[in-house]
Protein backbone atom coordinates (compact mmCIF):
# COMPACT_ATOMS: atom_id res chain seq x y z
CA UNK A 1 0.00 0.00 0.00
CA UNK A 2 1.05 3.59 -0.44
CA UNK A 3 1.49 6.45 1.97
CA UNK A 4 -2.09 7.23 3.07
CA UNK A 5 -3.01 3.61 3.75
CA UNK A 6 0.21 2.99 5.67
CA UNK A 7 -0.38 6.14 7.73
CA UNK A 8 -3.97 5.20 8.52
CA UNK A 9 -3.28 1.65 9.66
CA UNK A 10 -0.16 2.61 11.65
CA UNK A 11 -1.79 5.55 13.42
CA UNK A 12 -3.49 3.56 16.22
CA UNK A 13 -0.05 2.33 17.32
CA UNK A 14 0.98 5.78 18.56
CA UNK A 15 3.42 8.42 17.37
CA UNK A 16 6.64 6.40 17.48
CA UNK A 17 5.01 3.38 15.86
CA UNK A 18 3.53 5.57 13.11
CA UNK A 19 6.89 7.26 12.55
CA UNK A 20 8.58 3.87 12.20
CA UNK A 21 5.99 2.86 9.63
CA UNK A 22 6.53 6.13 7.72
CA UNK A 23 10.21 5.28 7.49
CA UNK A 24 9.41 1.94 5.84
CA UNK A 25 9.89 3.07 2.25
CA UNK A 26 12.93 5.20 3.10
CA UNK A 27 15.03 2.93 5.34
CA UNK A 28 16.96 -0.17 4.32
CA UNK A 29 18.18 -3.01 6.47
CA UNK A 30 17.38 -3.60 10.11
CA UNK A 31 15.83 -0.91 12.30
CA UNK A 32 18.35 1.26 14.11
CA UNK A 33 18.76 -0.37 17.56
CA UNK A 34 19.01 3.14 19.06
CA UNK A 35 15.41 3.85 18.03
CA UNK A 36 12.62 3.50 20.59
CA UNK A 37 11.11 0.01 20.55
CA UNK A 38 7.80 1.28 19.17
CA UNK A 39 9.55 2.92 16.20
CA UNK A 40 11.40 -0.30 15.42
CA UNK A 41 8.08 -2.14 15.63
CA UNK A 42 6.52 0.38 13.23
CA UNK A 43 9.20 -0.27 10.63
CA UNK A 44 8.68 -4.03 10.93
CA UNK A 45 4.93 -3.43 10.67
CA UNK A 46 5.32 -1.50 7.41
CA UNK A 47 7.39 -4.28 5.86
CA UNK A 48 5.01 -7.00 7.01
CA UNK A 49 2.06 -5.07 5.56
CA UNK A 50 3.89 -4.77 2.22
CA UNK A 51 4.47 -8.54 2.16
CA UNK A 52 0.82 -9.24 3.04
CA UNK A 53 -0.37 -6.81 0.37
CA UNK A 54 1.86 -8.11 -2.43
CA UNK A 55 0.75 -11.70 -1.84
CA UNK A 56 -2.97 -11.02 -1.37
CA UNK A 57 -5.10 -12.73 -4.08
CA UNK A 58 -7.10 -9.56 -4.77
CA UNK A 59 -3.91 -7.57 -5.34
CA UNK A 60 -2.42 -10.32 -7.50
CA UNK A 61 -5.61 -10.30 -9.62
CA UNK A 62 -5.57 -6.50 -9.83
CA UNK A 63 -1.96 -6.52 -11.08
CA UNK A 64 -3.03 -8.89 -13.85
CA UNK A 65 -5.36 -6.18 -15.23
CA UNK A 66 -2.33 -4.37 -16.65
CA UNK A 67 -0.70 -5.32 -19.93
CA UNK A 68 3.02 -5.05 -20.62
CA UNK A 69 4.90 -2.78 -20.30
CA UNK A 70 2.74 -1.38 -17.46
CA UNK A 71 2.44 -4.76 -15.76
CA UNK A 72 6.02 -4.42 -14.61
CA UNK A 73 4.95 -1.30 -12.69
CA UNK A 74 1.53 -2.57 -11.59
CA UNK A 75 2.51 -2.67 -7.93
CA UNK A 76 3.36 1.04 -8.00
CA UNK A 77 0.18 1.88 -9.89
CA UNK A 78 -1.98 -0.07 -7.44
CA UNK A 79 -0.32 1.57 -4.45
CA UNK A 80 -1.21 5.00 -5.78
CA UNK A 81 -4.68 4.14 -7.08
CA UNK A 82 -5.67 2.30 -3.90
CA UNK A 83 -4.69 5.42 -1.91
CA UNK A 84 -6.96 7.35 -4.28
CA UNK A 85 -9.84 4.98 -3.54
CA UNK A 86 -9.14 5.15 0.19
CA UNK A 87 -9.11 8.96 0.12
CA UNK A 88 -12.41 9.11 -1.79
CA UNK A 89 -14.15 6.94 0.83
CA UNK A 90 -12.07 7.85 3.88
CA UNK A 91 -15.09 8.32 6.16
CA UNK A 92 -15.80 4.60 5.82
CA UNK A 93 -12.44 3.80 7.42
CA UNK A 94 -11.90 6.62 9.90
CA UNK A 95 -14.05 8.75 12.17
CA UNK A 96 -11.52 11.55 11.64
CA UNK A 97 -12.09 13.65 8.50
CA UNK A 98 -9.43 13.15 5.84
CA UNK A 99 -8.24 16.78 5.94
CA UNK A 100 -7.80 16.61 9.72
CA UNK A 101 -5.98 13.30 9.51
CA UNK A 102 -3.75 14.62 6.73
CA UNK A 103 -2.87 17.76 8.72
CA UNK A 104 -2.11 15.72 11.84
CA UNK A 105 0.05 13.31 9.84
CA UNK A 106 2.07 16.11 8.28
CA UNK A 107 2.46 17.72 11.71
CA UNK A 108 3.86 14.45 13.07
CA UNK A 109 6.48 14.32 10.31
CA UNK A 110 7.24 18.04 10.52
CA UNK A 111 7.93 17.68 14.25
CA UNK A 112 10.53 14.98 13.50
CA UNK A 113 12.28 16.44 10.48
CA UNK A 114 15.70 16.15 12.11
CA UNK A 115 15.18 12.39 12.33
CA UNK A 116 13.97 11.82 8.76
CA UNK A 117 16.19 10.54 5.95
CA UNK A 118 16.72 12.87 3.00
CA UNK A 119 14.34 11.02 0.68
CA UNK A 120 11.51 11.33 3.22
CA UNK A 121 12.34 15.04 3.67
CA UNK A 122 11.90 15.46 -0.07
CA UNK A 123 8.64 13.51 -0.08
CA UNK A 124 7.37 15.56 2.86
CA UNK A 125 8.06 18.74 0.88
CA UNK A 126 6.18 17.23 -2.09
CA UNK A 127 3.21 16.43 0.18
CA UNK A 128 3.11 19.97 1.52
CA UNK A 129 3.33 21.48 -1.97
CA UNK A 130 0.50 19.34 -3.33
CA UNK A 131 -1.79 19.07 -0.32
CA UNK A 132 -1.17 15.37 0.23
CA UNK A 133 -2.25 13.00 1.53
CA UNK A 134 -5.70 14.66 1.54
CA UNK A 135 -5.49 15.45 -2.20
CA UNK A 136 -5.13 11.77 -3.14
CA UNK A 137 -8.91 11.85 -3.59
CA UNK A 138 -8.50 14.00 -6.73
CA UNK A 139 -7.64 11.82 -9.72
CA UNK A 140 -5.92 14.74 -11.46
CA UNK A 141 -3.57 14.81 -8.47
CA UNK A 142 -2.96 11.10 -9.02
CA UNK A 143 -1.65 12.03 -12.44
CA UNK A 144 0.82 14.47 -10.87
CA UNK A 145 1.88 11.86 -8.30
CA UNK A 146 2.56 9.35 -11.08
CA UNK A 147 4.66 11.93 -12.95
CA UNK A 148 6.64 12.51 -9.77
CA UNK A 149 7.24 8.78 -9.32
CA UNK A 150 8.30 8.41 -12.95
CA UNK A 151 10.83 11.21 -12.49
CA UNK A 152 12.37 9.40 -9.52
CA UNK A 153 12.67 6.01 -11.19
CA UNK A 154 16.16 5.16 -12.37
CA UNK A 155 15.03 4.18 -15.91
CA UNK A 156 12.45 5.66 -18.29
CA UNK A 157 9.02 4.15 -17.67
CA UNK A 158 5.37 4.52 -18.73
CA UNK A 159 4.29 5.27 -15.15
CA UNK A 160 3.89 9.00 -15.69
CA UNK A 161 1.33 8.44 -18.46
CA UNK A 162 -0.64 5.68 -16.71
CA UNK A 163 -3.61 7.71 -15.40
CA UNK A 164 -5.87 7.01 -18.43
CA UNK A 165 -5.20 3.28 -18.04
CA UNK A 166 -6.14 3.43 -14.37
CA UNK A 167 -9.32 5.34 -15.20
CA UNK A 168 -10.25 2.72 -17.81
CA UNK A 169 -9.89 -0.01 -15.17
CA UNK A 170 -11.60 1.92 -12.39
CA UNK A 171 -14.54 -0.48 -11.94
CA UNK A 172 -12.57 -3.74 -11.54
CA UNK A 173 -9.93 -1.95 -9.46
CA UNK A 174 -12.67 -0.73 -7.12
CA UNK A 175 -13.95 -4.30 -6.75
CA UNK A 176 -10.49 -5.60 -5.90
CA UNK A 177 -9.92 -2.79 -3.42
CA UNK A 178 -13.28 -3.35 -1.72
CA UNK A 179 -12.48 -7.03 -1.26
CA UNK A 180 -8.90 -6.45 -0.15
CA UNK A 181 -8.94 -3.45 2.15
CA UNK A 182 -11.13 -4.82 4.97
CA UNK A 183 -8.80 -7.81 5.18
CA UNK A 184 -5.81 -5.49 5.30
CA UNK A 185 -7.35 -3.51 8.16
CA UNK A 186 -8.02 -6.70 10.11
CA UNK A 187 -4.50 -8.00 9.48
CA UNK A 188 -3.02 -4.63 10.51
CA UNK A 189 -4.98 -4.64 13.79
CA UNK A 190 -3.65 -8.08 14.74
CA UNK A 191 -0.11 -7.33 13.61
CA UNK A 192 0.02 -4.03 15.53
CA UNK A 193 -1.12 -5.76 18.70
CA UNK A 194 1.51 -8.48 18.34
CA UNK A 195 4.36 -6.09 17.57
CA UNK A 196 3.50 -3.73 20.40
CA UNK A 197 2.91 -6.48 22.99
Image (tube, rainbow, N blue to C red):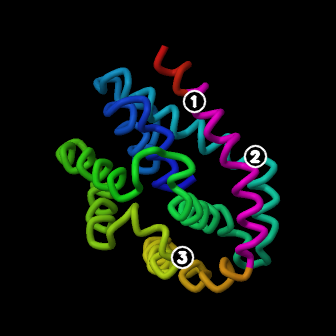
Please report whichever mark, 1 or 3, sits nearer to the chain's N-terminal start.
Answer: 3
> Which residue corresponds to the image point at 40% horizontal and 45% vertical from the top-left?
22
Q: Main secondary structure of the magenta part?
A: helix
Density class for disc 1 (Cα within 10 Å; few <14, some 14-19, many ≥20) is some
> How far, Cα to Cα, is label 2 from label 3?
28 Å
Instruction: Describe the element under mark 2 as helix, strand or loop.
Output: loop
Q: Is residue 49 left or right of residue 165?
A: left
The location of residue 189, given as percent across then percent down, is 57, 30
- Of marks 2 and 3, the one in the foreground: 2
Mark 3 residue crowding within 10 angstroms, few (<14) / some (14–19) / many (20+) = few
Q: Which residue has dot 3 on it? A: 155
Q: Is residue 4 left or right of residue 129?
A: right
Q: Is residue 172 above or below residue 14?
A: below
Question: Marks 1/2: CA distance?
Answer: 17 Å
> Where are the magenta residues, as a range?
169-191
Q: Which residue occupies the foreground of this view, 59 or 167?
A: 167
CB atoms at circles 2 and 3 under 8 Å apart? no
- Helix or strand or loop: what does disc 1 sit on? helix
Amino acid sequence: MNHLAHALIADPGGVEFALGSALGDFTHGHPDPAWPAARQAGLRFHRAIDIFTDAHPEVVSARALFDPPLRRYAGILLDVWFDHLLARDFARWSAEPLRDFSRRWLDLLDARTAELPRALHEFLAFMHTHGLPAAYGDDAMIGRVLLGIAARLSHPSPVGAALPVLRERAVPLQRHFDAFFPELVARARDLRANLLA
